[in-house]
Amino acid sequence: MPRYVVERIFPDGLEISAGAEGVGVWEGIVAKNSDDGVTWIHSYVSADHRKTFCVYDAETPEAIRKTAARNGLPVEQITQVRVLDPYFYP
């Protein structure tokens, strides 16, 4: 399955509670993603919490855009990627 990095911009910053409320938010996002065959792998968050770089597996960028809209998440850019691991080479 193709892998993508999704860049998101949050002008006011992204703050999600570390408690039960935050867990509910993440579980809801994962559930909606799975409805369209989109798997959230992990994300990186900038130090100021205004930008995220999220790694997803999905059949198409359109599937990611569809789930982002259902989750109320912005999409700035979607880039198809592959792993380049420096430890793979001797």
Image (cartoon, rainbow, N blue to C red):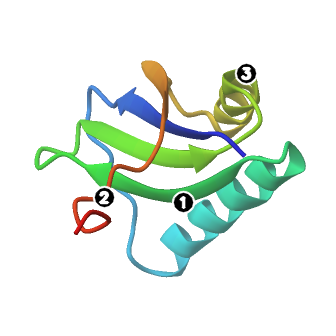
Residue furthest to the right = 35
Distance from the alpha carbon under mark 3 to that under mark 1: 17 Å
* 79 in relation to 50, above or below: above
Residue at 38%, 76% (x, y): give it. 18
**Front position among marks 2 and 3:** 2
- Name the residue located 65 percent from the left edge and 40 percent from the top edge: 2
Q: Where the C terminus falls, by quadrant? A: bottom left
Helix, strand or loop at mark 3: helix
- Residues at marks 2 and 3, CA–CA distance in whole angstroms: 27 Å
Q: Residue at x 33, y 31 (%)?
A: 10
Tag 2 secondary structure: loop
* Viewer-proximal residue among 68 and 43: 43
Q: What numbered label is drawn on residue 85?
A: 2
Left or right: 34 in relation to 25: right
Where is residue 46? Give x, y as percent: 18, 45
Across and down, in percent, residue 65 comes to 66, 25
* In the depicted structure, whether residue 22 falls above or below residue 60: below
> Distance of mark 2 from mark 1, alpha carbons?
17 Å
- Is the residue under label 3 in contact with that under label 2 (CB below 8 Å)? no
Mark 3 and mark 1 lie on one chain; the one further toward the N terminus is 1
Q: Residue at x 42, y 19 (%)?
A: 76
For label 1, the residue is 41
Identify the mark nearer the N-term, 2 or 1: 1
- As drawn, the label of residue 62 is 3
Q: Mark 1: which amino acid?
A: Ile
Given the image, on which type of amino acid does mark 3 rest? Glu
